[in-house]
Image (cartoon, rainbow, N blue to C red):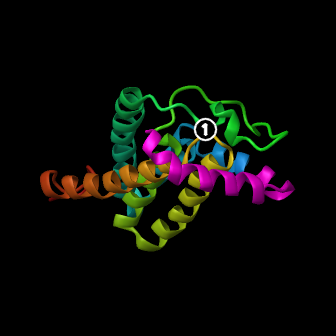
Amino acid sequence: MEFFLPFDIPILSFVQHHLHNPFTDFLFPLATYLGELGACWVFISLVLLFMKKYRRAGILMLAAMLLGTLLGEVLLKNIICRPRPFTYASLLPPGASLLISPPSGYSFPSGHTCASFTAATALFTQHKKEGLLAYGLAILIAFSRIFLLVHFPSDVLAGALLGASLGVLVPWACKKWLPPLQSPLETP
């Protein structure tokens, strides 16, 4: 993963040297906590399950996020084993400290970003307007990971690409191979 450092280091340096202020130092830890374990996306998906109009989107979001967790968190992170940026002392500005507790595990790809883009994309495939709003939150969560020095930009980019791909693939596969979702009270 060293070949990504010429891309990653300038972006991390710029963010660390120019974007920290009291507002961003408050906002981005909050955004990261929203994405912890995909919690906000799981919550949104579960809420959607109880609304007939959005039920299919909720199911697709959960299925795609489960697949993203298996591929990103379980498989790729443990194959690639990339250290997190905060472990590189040269990346930290003088006197800087992490604004959140250091996460465990490896860095590539970003799980927060993967879950966020998986959920947002799956929602977008079913409901464009709501999906666009979800992308706004996904971008905020993804950037928070770079801002907080827990992921390299390439980790976040990989998480977004994996998530968006799964967010398209799962609805497509379900449409192609599974029957339409129906309520038990509906007749075919």
Q: Quadrant of residue 122?
A: bottom left
* Residue closer to the observer: 121 or 6: 6
* Residue closer to the observer: 156 or 74: 156
Asked whether residue 187 is drawn in magenta, I would say no
Do we see residue 152 in this rendering?
Answer: yes
Q: Quadrant of the C terminus?
A: bottom left
* Residue occupying image coordinates x 16% and y 51%: 178
* Residue occupying image coordinates x 14% and y 57%: 176
Q: Position of residue 93 (x, y in %)?
A: 77, 44
Q: Quadrant of the N terminus?
A: top left
How many neighbours does mark 1 have within 10 angstroms: few (below 14), some (14-19), or many (20 or more)? many
Q: Is residue 177 above or below residue 76?
A: below
Q: Position of residue 142 (x, y in %)?
A: 56, 52
Left or right: 32, with 39 as reference point: right
* Residue occupying image coordinates x 59% and y 49%: 9
Q: Quadrant of residue 94?
A: top right
Q: Main secondary structure of the magenta part?
A: helix
Left or right: 9, with 185 as reference point: right
Q: Position of residue 111 (x, y in %)?
A: 48, 40
* Residue closer to the observer: 6 or 8: 6
* Residue at the bottom extreme, as displayed: 129
Q: Regarding mark 1 in the picture, which secondary structure is present there? A: helix
Q: Amino acid at mark 1?
A: Pro
* Residue occupying image coordinates x 49% and y 69%: 132
Left or right: 170, with 152 as reference point: left
* Residue closer to the observer: 133 or 94: 94
Residue under pointer 1:
85
Asked whether residue 9 is drawn in magenta, I would say yes
Q: Position of residue 89 (x, y in %)?
A: 69, 33
Identify the magenta region.
1-27
Q: Quadrant of residue 18?
A: bottom right
